[in-house]
Image (cartoon, rainbow, N blue to C red):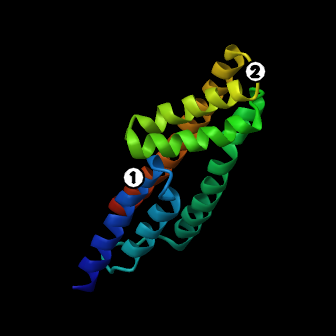
Amino acid sequence: MMDIIWIILGGLFLVGGIVGSVLPIIPGPPVAFLGIVFTQLSDRINIEGKWMWILGIAAVVITIIDFIIPSYFTKRYGAHRISTILSIVGMMIGLFFFPPLGLIIGPFIGAFVGELLAGRVWKQGVKSAWATFIGFVFGTMLKLIYASYCIFVAISNA
């Protein structure tokens, strides 16, 4: 009976990891890793210890990288600091008022408005908004790949 509970709980967390890879409110990789840990607690799924360490370290590294990527891209394209802040605000507004498309459009609009408020021309605003969009997509894809791989590991070791 406990095996079934651990597997169901693990499955919910693995799905939560996928959802969290797209929604910024849920930390996708750590949640997916917790799903792996829960499934490992059952007697039916056996993942080698070295893979547990690798997946755990990867979850931490990807989570840290996800915080660095957006600022890297915005700085690389010369975005103003206010653009970075407003891109995050735009993402939150987009998430709550226009899901799921708002997650993509919100940061773009926020960065664009930030550049205009900083006194830059619209061309720099579009360039910074594009950089923010690329950073968001890159980070999201990295998290989705990790969470999907966690599901693959859990299923293949069942």
If you read the primary sequence from the N terminus, does the residue marked by circle 1 or circle 2 appear first?
Answer: 1
Q: CA distance from mark 1 to mark 2?
A: 36 Å
The residue drawn where x is 33% and y is 80% is: 43
Q: Position of residue 34 (x, y in %)?
A: 46, 69
The correct choice, above or below, for 158 with respect to 141 in the image is below
Q: Residues within 10 Å of mark 2 (few under 14, many from 20)?
A: some
Q: The N terminus lies in which quarter of the figure?
A: bottom left
The mark closer to the camera, 1 or 2, is 2
The correct choice, above or below, for 88 with respect to 39 in the image is above
- Secondary structure, mark 1, is helix
The correct choice, above or below, for 96 with respect to 150 in the image is above
Residue 4 can be seen in this image: yes
The correct choice, above or below, for 104 with respect to 42 in the image is above
Residue 158 can be seen in this image: no
- Residue designated by label 1: 19
- Secondary structure, mark 2, is loop
Q: Position of residue 66 (x, y in %)?
A: 62, 49
Q: The C terminus lies in which quarter of the figure?
A: bottom left
Q: Position of residue 74 (x, y in %)?
A: 71, 33
| Kind of residue sitting beneath label 2 | Arg
Q: Residues within 10 Å of mark 1 (few under 14, many from 20)?
A: many
Q: Quadrant of residue 94?
A: top left
Classify residue 41 as left or right of residue 139: left
- Residue designated by label 2: 120
Q: How many marks?
A: 2
Residue 114: give its label: none
